[in-house]
Amino acid sequence: MSQTGTIEFKDEREAGRLLAVEDGQVVGLIAYFVLAKAPGALVAVHTIVEPGHEGRGIAGDLVHAFYGIAAAEGVPVVPLCPYAASWAARHPDQAPEAPAAVVAAAKAQLDASPDLW
């Protein structure tokens, strides 16, 4: 069970970050990019929880919120971040697997532009 309390999630799409904010302070984030090639996808590259906030379920809540945003937009998630991939494997009911072609396109876009995150 998550013990995150009053954490809010803020999608900073232009910056490629989904922030976890508690009392006005960023306590964690997912760095991501939007796959340019159709059908599009949200590609999680890195999940970070700030020092002193570990062990509270923040990373899992971030990934869950990230999948929720993608579902609301009707696009898949490509979890290139090892933590997001692990979370998705543990929660297949909440984290549908992206088609192989979308995963390949996301990896190619990241390889071509490593500055995406």
Image (cartoon, rainbow, N blue to C red):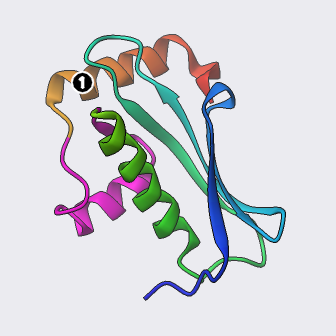
Looking at this view, name the residue that lies furthest to the front. 72
Q: Is residue 116 left or right of residue 43?
A: right
Q: Residue beneath label 1, please?
A: 102
3 over 33 or under it: above or below: below
User: Which of 5/56 is in front?
Assistant: 5
Residue 52 image-quadrant placement: bottom right
Quadrant occupied by the N terminus: bottom left
115 over 23 or under it: above or below: above
Could you tell me if residue 1 is visible in this image? yes
The part of the chain drawn in magenta is: 75-97
Q: Is residue 41 left or right of residue 113?
A: left
The spot of residue 21 in percent (x, y) is: 72, 62
User: Which of 78/22 is in front?
Assistant: 22
| Residue lying at 37% horizontally and 52% vertically, measured from the top left | 68
The spot of residue 72 in percent (x, y) is: 34, 42
Q: Is residue 70 left or right of residue 53?
A: left
44 over 24 or under it: above or below: above
The spot of residue 83 in percent (x, y) is: 44, 58
Could you tell me how many numbered marks the image carries?
1
Residue 116 image-quadrant placement: top right
- Name which residue type carries label 1: Val
User: Which of 64/78 is in front?
Assistant: 64
The spot of residue 42 in percent (x, y) is: 41, 33
Within-10-Å neighbours for mark 1: few <14, some 14–19, many 20+: many
Local SS, label 1: helix
